[in-house]
Image: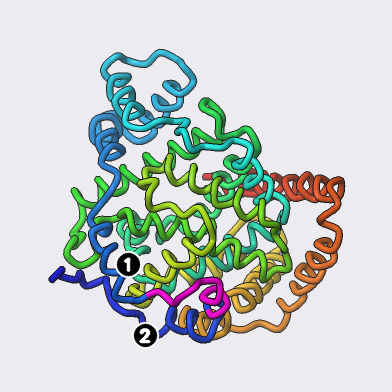
Amino acid sequence: MLQLPYRYKINTSSFRHYWTKGIGVELLHKLDIVPRIEDAEQFIPLLYQYDKAGDKVAVELYLKQGFKAANAYLLQYLDGIPIPSELKEVLDAFFGCFNIEPDWLDWDLLEVGQRFCQRPGLSSLIVLRDYCLMGGYESAAINKPLVYTGALKKGAVKRLTDTVEFWVQITKPGNLRPTSMGFKQVMLTRMIHSFSRVQILEKTDWEIEKWGIPINTWDMLATHLGFSEVFLVGLRRMGIKPGEEEIKGLFHFWKYISYLLGIPVELLPDHEPEAIKALYYWTMTQREGDVDTLQLARALQEEPVQAFYPKSLLMRKMMREVHLFYNHYLLGDYSCQLLGLPKTRIGRLALAKVWRNKQLERNIEDDAFREKCIRNGAEEQENVRQIYETYNKG
């Protein structure tokens, strides 16, 4: 009999409500049969599995050179700029562990996914922030590495700045080719994961028997599902109606990203029913949020006020109300109550965005109109990236 770690618990509140009374009910209708919760035990070994190839780079390059210098060497290496031979050997060995362009990769389908991520414009960023990220705080275990790396002290503003930068770079068509900025962002992110994991295990009192390995393979799969399936669910709630090819493209796009991040490719779903099943297994075996996750949720709630844009404090407080509305609209009142997120009346003005999306979707089958929406959406996301870059860096 497999011994269950402390973090593995059949969820009785937050995520159970999602699957029995929330949006999850509609998702389960897409499956032929409701998954058996007992079958989730097959994934328990993934709580102790991690990116060993990345961790080797963290030990042999990052710990010896320092984080900033190691990042610089990695970028030089990717640009074909000579670096010290002993460091080149480390990176040669790492990139020799996987194929940058695997046989299953379809660049055209991947670009369909990128363009779909751009098409909703601000709505994509709203869903990522107020649904995917905030909803993830309903689980204690997956967020423990944030606490142990001091992310709480660094604040939500920096986390969102980094996330928006990552998102905009990887969703630009053509930007995942080797030497491109999107590809570099993915590799830098993989190194951050490994460096954080090595540091947590070496320098803190992290309890593996309680939480598994920090940033383990199963939690990485959950993050993948957050950016793909949960993101898709949120966009539909925002009035976006993806086509079948866009859905296929979205999953293929994130399959490649997650493959580059070190997740075993056999775990990555190609289709929505596979993703729903994987999401069910992970969410329904999560220990509920705790004091740490409540603090993370509170920090994200207050992020608009703590940011440096707009300059008017009143406008920043208004933005907080708008995001609170989207939290309730996307997550539901039950989850928001568990996360300690108050209701807002002022923020209901944000419904105008949903109404606008529904109006635009009426013409989305027109090719010229869709192209215009993609261009406008990409521009909106780039503008947000520049705002974060200008006002919040450092």
Q: Position of residue 188 (x, y in %)?
A: 43, 37
31 part of magenta stretch: yes
Q: Magenta region: which residues? A: 25-35
Pointer 2 local density, CA inside 10 Å: few below 14, some 14–19, many at least 20: few
- Residue hosting label 2: 12
**17 versus 2 height, above or below:** below
Tell me which corner region of the image, top left, top right, bottom left or bottom right, holds residue 72: top left
For the point 64% across and 77% down, the residue is 329
Question: In the depicted view, which residue is nearer to us: 339 or 113?
Answer: 113
For the point 37% across and 85% down, the residue is 12
Q: Position of residue 237 (x, y in %)?
A: 67, 71
Amino acid type of the residue tagged 2 in the rendering: Thr
Q: How is the image coloured?
A: rainbow
- Residue hosting label 1: 141
Pointer 1 local density, CA inside 10 Å: few below 14, some 14–19, many at least 20: many
Question: In the depicted view, which residue is nearer to us: 166 or 216?
Answer: 216
183 part of magenta stretch: no
Q: Is residue 99 left or right of residue 384?
A: left
Question: Disc 1 to disc 2, how far (Cα)?
Answer: 15 Å
Question: In the depicted view, which residue is nearer to us: 178 or 306?
Answer: 178
